Image (cartoon, helix red, strand yellow):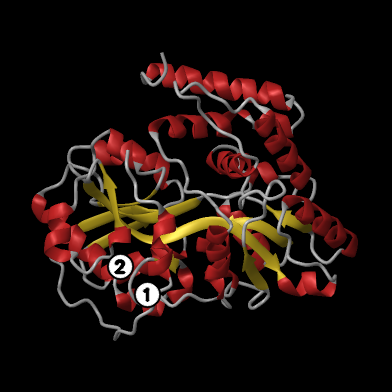
Amino acid sequence: MLMRRTALALTFVLAASTAAIAACPFENKVPIRSLTAGFEAWKAVTGAMAECGNFRAELDQEFRTKQPAAFAAKPSLYHLGGVANETMVPLVDQQTIRPLDDLVAKHGKHLSPNQLIKVDGKIMAIAMMVNTQHLMYRKDILAELNIAPPTSYDEMLAAAEKIKQSGKVRYPIGATMRTGWNLAQDFVNMHLGFGGTFFAADNKPTVNSDAGVKTLEMMKKLSAYMDPEFLTGDSTYVQQQFQKSRVAMANFWASRAGAMDNAAESEVVGKVAMASAPRAMANGKAATTLWWDGIVIAKNITDEEAEAAFKLAMHGLGKGMVQKNNAAAVWLVDGYQPGAHAQGVIQSLQNGAPAFPASPQMGLMHAAIGNNIADFFTGKATAPEALTKVEAAYLASARERGLVK
């Protein structure tokens, strides 16, 4: 599977333009529905699509579990989907989204090459933003305690101890470690940061390794400074912890940065800064992965519906939307002006953060990790025991799919 790496988008991200903000230039007469995640960038994009009429957006953080079946229905339950590196893979495998080359030629000639996500030479998605988990921290608290922004996880632990002793926040660290997808993603980031691999050449698993053990041990050290219920913490929960001044640091999604300065719901406006994701080991790369988010269009709909959906998406991903919502994401859309919220993404790129290694086997590994390492954090399994369970679960799924003999 060939996917354009998000690192290539940096030059486009940094290219700004000036354009007049305009309302929808056409009236959409074909009823269109979308299913996407619910963070600020998707609210902005789907809000712009709604300006054209006859559009209904479903914003749901469980979109990744609902999309495969919804798009496989005949007709599809949704016309548009919001996806990222990994979440597009099941839709491609099931052949439930359509190539977009003809629609790009007709309505998307303005798109940057970096927005055109290709699989086997065909455009299958339009990327709208770069996303990654990077360090967010309370710059006021670190300044008061004379703590430099951590550049490694060892430094983050030292900073957390000082913050804990100061009593300035309830928990020094926040993390998206909810059992399942979130926990797996934190493991993937840290594991790559320790130089770990996931598969051998024959697709056999390689996570039960020195790097795998170090990953779990570091995650457990960090968890000592978190809410005791950290295994239930997802992105929305960590966002609210920051906004309510309950945490001081987190390796957290860039797509949530704008919410920190939303005066309607945040108590820490102007107090949260962004920096590169920390390193897991000396001289290592930033321990995070780069993602793109974008749109796909269902295969099991009419050509008329597909064209209407694509036109809506092009308006939703327009300059006017970006200029109204510049801080909501690190956009790949023309008109974006990089600001303070983009600095963590840019620095993580500069510090070697790799793209998330999306593939069918990685999807199975991700699920196996998320479902089998929680016992290590609750004391029910050692690190090697938990990783043995991960590998067994992956092998069972991979053999069923024919990925491993």
Total number of numbered discs in the rendering: 2
Question: Which amino acid does the dot numbered 2 rest on?
Answer: Leu
Residue at point 64%, 60% (across, down): 135
Which residue lies most toward the top here? 405
Q: Earlier in the sequence, mark 2 or mark 1?
A: 2
Is residue 371 visible to the viewer in this orientation of the structure? yes
On the image, the x and y values in percent for residue 86 come to: 41, 43
Q: Is residue 33 left or right of residue 167?
A: left
What SS does tag 2 mark?
loop
* Image quadrant containing the N terminus: top left
Spatial CA distance of label 2 from label 1 is 7 Å
Residue at point 15%, 46% (across, down): 301
* Image quadrant containing the C terminus: top left
Question: Which amino acid does the dot numbered 1 rest on?
Answer: Val
On the image, the x and y values in percent for residue 378 come to: 74, 32
**Residue 361: quadrant of the picture:** top left
Q: Is residue 82 left or right of residue 149?
A: left
In this figure, which residue is indicated by the disc labeled 2? Answer: 317
Q: Give the vertical position of 272 relative to 302 (above or below).
A: below
Q: Residues within 10 Å of mark 2 (few under 14, many from 20)?
A: many
On the image, the x and y values in percent for residue 230 come to: 69, 45
Is residue 59 visible to the viewer in this orientation of the structure? no
Q: Give the vertical position of 179 relative to 341 (above or below).
A: above
Q: Residues within 10 Å of mark 1 (few under 14, many from 20)?
A: many
On the image, the x and y values in percent for residue 248 come to: 73, 63
Which residue lies most toward the right here? 165
Residue 225 marker: none
In this figure, which residue is indicated by the disc labeled 1? Answer: 322
What SS does tag 1 mark?
helix
Q: Is residue 74 left or right of residue 235?
A: left
